Image (cartoon, rainbow, N blue to C red):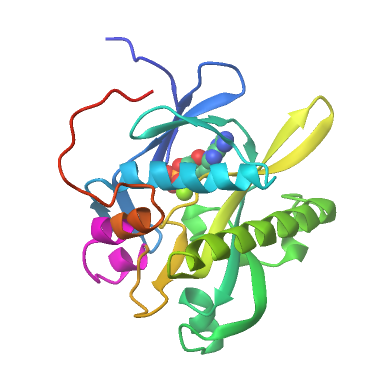
Amino acid sequence: MAPRRKKIYEGKAKILYEGPEPGTLVQYFKDDATAFNAQKKATIEGKGVLNNRLSEYFMTGLANIGVPNHFIKRLNMREQLIRQVEIVPLEVIVRNFAAGSIAKRLGLEEGTPLPRPIVEYSYKNDELGDPLVPEEYIIAFGWANQQDLDDIVALALRVNDFLTGVFYGVGIKLIDFKIEIGRIWDGDFMRLIVADEISPDSCRLWDVKTGQKLDKDVFRRDLGSLTDAYTEVAKRLGVLPTNTQPIKPTLIN
Ligand SMILES: Nc1ncnc2c1ncn2[C@@H]1O[C@H](COP(=O)(O)OP(=O)(O)O)[C@@H](O)[C@H]1O
Ligand SMILES: [Mg+2]
């Protein structure tokens, strides 16, 4: 049987297919979870559905406040139509409180407020384990130039302010998050936009009152059900109905 459409790339959490029009892709969210550079793996029932919805929610909100991103529309439970970009090979990380690698590197207790939001970069390379890189490397190796980096920092900080506010409104503290940035061209004019995904896979989220983790650290550190944590985030944001009574099947789209 001929494949329904061409697979462009299969990563750890998502699959990209050729889109219906040039310059578009279909992004399929898998249930696979990986951590520690894919040394730890599992399939988490329902994760892809939740992340597809949540990424749609954040990208739509960002577009509404003028932060350009790749999201076009959700197609179904697991897929969304996106603009194809040329990915800048960096993970752009924004940190508000110490956790993970910065806590380890600087000997800070997790949850320590940082003096201001810190933007850092790691080079997207699985074999190398996405190493932290300074701006000097990024510019020297031509992954981005100084103007790009200024634009990337401005985008990252706008995303941070938006997400911090949205999460704070539902009793969740945004500890840190990671985004990816892509290039699109309007003729000769290049623009940088937010790409990939924004979801509890790419954020650290702590309940404001209890400090309970509601993000991928639940999987990394074996703290319970990841689906329950992501479902809680989605419910608080009103992305999923809080009423879980069975409802009559309805056609969507
Ligand atoms: N709009 C886009 N256009 C092209 N590539 C994208 C876009 N958004 C995300 N990507 C890339 O698609 C892949 C998403 O799949 P994922 O499972 O996250 O991969 P990985 O294992 O490489 O992190 C990533 O490599 C990401 O850089
Ligand atoms: Mg990824």
- Quarter of the image holding residue 252? top left
- In the rendered structure, does residue 143 fall within the stretch colored magenta? no
The residue lying toward the viewer, choosing from 66 and 145, is 66
**Percent of width and height locating residue 229:** 29, 62
**Percent of width and height locating residue 158:** 68, 58
Q: Which residues are magenta?
A: 216-230
- Quarter of the image holding residue 123? bottom right
Instruction: Let me know if residue 86 appears in the view.
Output: yes
The residue lying toward the viewer, choosing from 69 and 4, is 69
Instruction: Name the side, left or right, on which 6 lies relative to 113.
Output: left
Q: Residue at x 62, y 41 (%)?
A: 69
Instruction: Name the side, left or right, on which 158 lies relative to 44.
Output: right
**Percent of width and height locating residue 244:** 20, 48
Q: Tell how many labels.
A: 0
Q: Residue at x 29, y 55 (%)?
A: 231
Q: Tell me: residue 213, above or below residue 123.
A: below
Instruction: Let me know if residue 12 appears in the view.
Output: no
Instruction: Name the side, left or right, on which 197 lies relative to 253.
Output: right
Q: Residue at x 15, y 40 (%)?
A: 246
